[in-house]
Image (cartoon, rainbow, N blue to C red):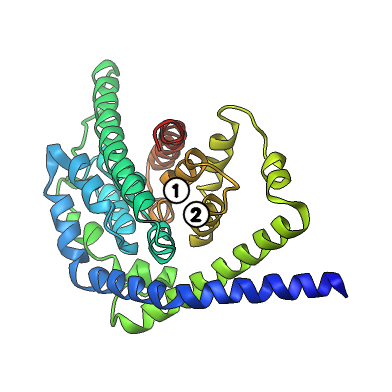
Amino acid sequence: MEILHDILHVLLHSLGELALMLPILFLTYLAMEALEHYAKEGTLLRIRKAKRIGPLLGGALGIIPQCGIAGGAANLFAGRVITAGTFLAVLLATSDEMLPILISNGEVGVIVKALAFKLIFAVFAGFAFDIALQLYRKRKPRTHHAKSYGECCDGHSHGEEYGIEIHEMCHREGCECHGGVLRPALRHTLKVALLIFAVSFAVSLAVHFIGEEKLVDILPDLPVLGEAVAALIGFIPSCSVSVVLTEFYLSGIIGSGEMMAGLLVNGGVGLLVLFKMNRGEGAMKKNIALCAALYLFGLLGGLLAGLIM
């Protein structure tokens, strides 16, 4: 009976915390959906026209909480309209569910530091990756005509069909990033609220029955390992990953390094769209290389965040 009483106490406490969080969570998602609805295509056009400063603009616009930006950038990259570094910067900067959860918890200081770090690191990584690719191409002997990023096999630009029409992909992925804003905002709120409740309830139970100090001690206290595992988890294409990582950070189970490593790699639906749209000769090798670069930069970013955040 005592155990049931403790479980009920934890359950009611978790529900109370969720009830306080729900209005702020809904208003945050409503603002995000409005931004998505009215500004997304203009944002993608700005990224498309960025050219040499692509990683700078990609990082700056990727930090804006819009679910379609990473997917739209993947389409632009598949159409050879933007550079790999620009797409990488968008992926690294994408905030996903971190922002609404931190806002609903009133973590203003963490929000400022996390967004600033994501922006600066994403821009740096994007430029570094583009420079590395340019140096590699100069050393590699060319056996065929190299196509530019805005040119496909027939010599014509396919940027329009690849870069702007993201609505069909959004519909396939079920993210409803077109149409009205109220219904998608409510759907996102309920979905994330259920995830937050599940994670919060599980963590609260573990803390109650195991103890916070023992729970933290379960995690391997080895350098780099925590960030490396978190970055691998970040590849899971689901908002639940960012919810779990952020909730674990707020609960004190993981540090800022592990949280940022996972969130840097977890670029929304960007990678899903990349593998669906970027096909053809040598495309799979390039997709895998881009994923490897994303992982390495995510790991490096997590290690840096652990030192300075």
Q: Where is residue 232 in the image (x, y as percent from the top left)?
A: 55, 42
SS at mark 2 in the image: helix
Please report the residue visible at 49 percent of the width from the left and 69 percent of the height from the top.
192
Please identify the quadrant where the C terminus is shown: top left
22 shown above or below 234: below
- Label 1 CA crowd tier, 10 Å (few <14, some 14–19, many 20+): many
Q: How many labels does the image show?
A: 2
Given residues 58 and 224, the one toward you in this image is 224
Query: In the image, is 165 to the left or to the right of 198?
Result: left
- Label 2 CA crowd tier, 10 Å (few <14, some 14–19, many 20+): many
Could you tell me the amino acid type at mark 2?
Thr
Q: Position of residue 82 (x, y in %)?
A: 21, 45
Query: Can residue 278 be seen at all in this image of the molecule?
Result: no
Query: In the image, is 216 to the left or to the right of 265?
Result: right
60 shown above or below 269: above
Which label number is shown at residue 246?
A: 2
Query: In the image, is 300 to the left or to the right of 178?
Result: right
Please identify the quadrant where the N terminus is shown: bottom right
Q: Where is residue 88 in the image (x, y as percent from the top left)?
A: 32, 42
Q: Circles 2 and 1: CB distance less than 8 Å?
A: yes
Q: Position of residue 213 (x, y in %)?
A: 69, 44
70 shown above or below 260: below
Which label number is shown at residue 263?
A: 1
Could you tell me the amino acid type at mark 1?
Leu
